[in-house]
């Protein structure tokens, strides 16, 4: 972490509740995520970044298709930044979230099938995902020219008793709960 990157308002690509997402100033294929300075839960959110780095790791070849790729950490004028591969749409701009796709009336049959594919993977992957929120899923074009929905946030296990260490039955039950919450959300946006 020898260089310090300067992130400017003009390079801001997206924003979540906790983090700003900037264009990497030197590489169009990368983004930098930083925890928003001065938010109340700043310290715990920075701790979550450490958890994300530990958990957002493919456990199988197939996992690589469905989760964002973290390249490492970098020091920035906005604090510690995560360097992450930028998921893109077919036109090269930053990938749209499932939330925006549904809101803009672009959720067609093809995308429904692609979402089913992601959800099938979600039920079987060993990567721990604690939130399938529609803003944490983006529709991106892969290098092989195929579109996929991918997960870009919500990695790790938030519960005190780590589900991963309990039975596979409990884990499956919690995944179904997570899935149901996401489908309800999808329904709410559509209506
Ligand atoms: N790897 C990525 N490729 C493309 N876009 C991304 C990527 N990661 C994040 N984004 C965009 O940035 C937004 C915010 O990122 P992220 O969800 O990581 O922030 P957050 O503040 O932790 O979110 P939350 O509000 O769920 O806590 C996402 O909703 C998405 O639009
Ligand atoms: Mg998010």
Image (cartoon, rainbow, N blue to C red):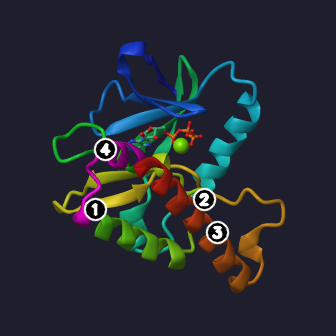
Which circle, 2 or 4, is nearer the viewer? 4
> Which image quadrant is residue 19 in?
top right
Residue indicated by mark 3 = 177
Q: Which residue is drawn at 73% across and 56% down?
A: 158
Give the Cα distance between marks 3 and 2. 20 Å
Q: Residue at x 30, y 38 (%)?
A: 94
Q: Residues within 10 Å of mark 4 (few under 14, many from 20)?
A: some
Q: According to the image, label 4 marks what residue?
A: 95
| Percent of width and height locating residue 126 | 57, 74
User: Which residue bears the numbered disc 2?
Assistant: 55
The local crowd at label 2, few if under 14, some if 14 to 19, many if 20 or more residues have their Cα within 10 Å, is some
Q: Which residue lies furthest to the front in this view?
A: 191
Task: Please say whether residue 102 is one of the residues in the magenta stretch.
Answer: yes
Image quadrant in which you'd find residue 66: bottom left
Element at label 2: helix
Residue 111's tag is 1
Label 2 vs label 1, nearer the camera: 1
Circles 2 and 1, Cβ within 8 Å, touching? The answer is no
Q: Does the residue labelled 4 lie within 8 Å of ligand 1?
A: yes
Label 3 vs label 2, nearer the camera: 3
Of labels 4 and 3, earlier in sequence is 4
Please report the residue visible at 52 percent of the width from the left and 54 percent of the height from the top.
185
Q: Give the range drawn in magenta.
A: 99-110
First in sequence, mark 1 or 4: give its number: 4
Residue 153 against residue 157 in the figure, above or below:
above
* Viewer-closest of 103 and 31: 103
Q: Do the residues labelled 4 and 3 touch (CB within 8 Å)?
A: no
Quarter of image, res 156 = bottom right
Ligand 1 neighbours mark 1 (CB distance < 8 Å): no
């Amino acid at each position: 972490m020898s260089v310090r990157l300067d992130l400017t308002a003009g390079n801001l690509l997206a924003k979540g509740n906790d983090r700003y997402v900037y264009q990497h100033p030197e590489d169009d294929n990368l983004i930098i995520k930083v925890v928003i300075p001065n938010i109340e839960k700043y310290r715990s959110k920075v701790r979550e970044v450490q958890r994300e780095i530990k958990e957002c790791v493919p456990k199988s070849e197939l996992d690589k298709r469905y989760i964002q790729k973290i390249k490492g950490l970098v020091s920035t004028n906005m604090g510690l930044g995560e360097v992450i591969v930028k998921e893109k749409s077919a036109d090269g701009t930053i990938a749209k979230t499932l939330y925006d796709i549904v809101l803009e009336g672009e959720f067609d049959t093809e995308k429904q099938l692609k979402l089913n594919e992601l959800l099938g993977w979600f039920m079987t992957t060993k990567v721990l995902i604690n939130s399938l929120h529609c803003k944490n899923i983006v529709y991106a074009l892969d290098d092989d020219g195929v579109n996929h929905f991918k997960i870009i946030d919500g990695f790790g296990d938030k519960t005190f008793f780590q589900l991963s260490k309990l039975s596979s039955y409990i884990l499956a039950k919690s995944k179904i709960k997570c899935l149901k919450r996401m489908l309800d959300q999808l329904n709410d946006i559509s209506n």
